[in-house]
Image (cartoon, rainbow, N blue to C red):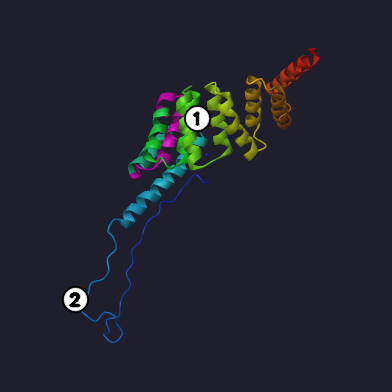
């Protein structure tokens, strides 16, 4: 399952101009009365640090557009430059991971997402990206923990959905019910939540609940073949059960 998925092509680099305000030299009007008084000085590196941060943001935004265009050849140099300017920005590593994922280099993608989490563990998007990659690589226990961290920082329907799927992949269907129910409650139109709820209920032998969940998923997308098959299957099972003496 894919998460329901992160301008102009030209950006102007910011620059900073320093200016000084001329003070009157007339002793009657000047607020400076002593020749020993010294003007207040700002930290020397403040503007330089801000300049690096802004430049890094511009490079990140430019990289996002290039990723959308699948122009990876130009993306990597921009992200490496942004990384040198702002090495503690987890978004940079997450974008690197996204590039590697799209290029099907799963090993490098996983390393990049892990780096994003290490650099900035307070960003829920970093944890979600890591969890999705681990889910794809069948690292279900690791994915489960990553989704838990993401939900602690920012509860979302997608986060609950993937937590439920992680439990399902581990065969823990009872534990999968709550996060899937939570996802469906927060987003009634989330087909994957209803569909996976149906699968869970079916595994647990709860045929009526499975039929209801599959029915809701089917109503949201009646042309989907898989949903049609699942609904038909549980309907047939329910009919057989009713015919038994």
Residue at 36% from the left image edge and 52% from the top image edge: 51
Q: Quadrant of residue 107?
A: top left
Quick one: label 2 or label 1, which is nearer the N terminus?
2
Q: Quadrant of residue 41?
A: bottom left
Q: Quote the CA–CA distance across marks 2 and 1.
A: 64 Å
Residue at 38% from the left image edge and 56% from the top image edge: 15
- Residue where numbered disc 1 is placed: 132
Does 226 appear above or below 64? above
- Residue where numbered disc 2 is placed: 36
Out of 21 and 53, give the one closest to the viewer.
53
Does 167 appear above or below 155? above
Out of 245 and 113, give the one closest to the viewer.
245
Out of 198 and 69, give the one closest to the viewer.
198
* Residue 78: x %, y % from top left: 40, 39
* Residue 167: x %, y % from top left: 54, 26
User: Residues in magenta?
Assistant: 85-109
Q: Left or right: 40 with respect to 36?
A: right
Q: Quadrant of residue 239?
A: top right
* Residue 120 appears in view: yes
Q: Is most of the magenta stretch helix, strand or loop?
A: helix
């Amino acid at each position: 399952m894919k998460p329901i998925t992160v301008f102009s092509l030209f950006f102007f680099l910011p620059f900073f101009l320093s200016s000084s305000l001329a003070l009157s030299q007339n002793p009657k009007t000047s607020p400076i009365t002593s020749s020993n008084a010294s003007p207040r000085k700002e930290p020397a590196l403040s503007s330089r640090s801000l300049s690096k941060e802004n430049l890094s943001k511009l490079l990140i935004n430019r990289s996002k557009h290039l990723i959308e265009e699948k122009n990876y050849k130009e993306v990597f140099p921009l992200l490496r430059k942004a990384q040198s300017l702002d090495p503690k920005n987890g978004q940079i590593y997450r974008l690197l991971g996204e590039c590697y994922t799209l290029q099907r280099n799963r090993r490098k993608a996983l390393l990049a997402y892990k780096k994003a989490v290490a650099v900035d563990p307070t960003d829920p998007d970093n944890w979600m990206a890591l969890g999705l990659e681990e889910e794809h690589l069948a690292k279900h226990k690791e994915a489960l923990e990553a989704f838990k961290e993401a939900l602690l920082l920012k509860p979302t329907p997608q986060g609950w959905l993937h937590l439920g799927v992680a439990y399902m992949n581990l065969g823990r269907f009872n534990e999968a019910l709550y996060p899937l129910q939570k996802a469906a409650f927060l987003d009634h139109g989330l087909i994957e939540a209803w569909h996976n709820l149906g699968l869970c209920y079916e595994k647990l032998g709860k045929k009526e609940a499975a039929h209801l969940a599959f029915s809701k998923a089917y109503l949201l997308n009646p042309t989907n073949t898989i949903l049609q098959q699942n609904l038909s299957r549980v309907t047939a099972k329910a009919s057989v059960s009713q015919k038994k003496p």
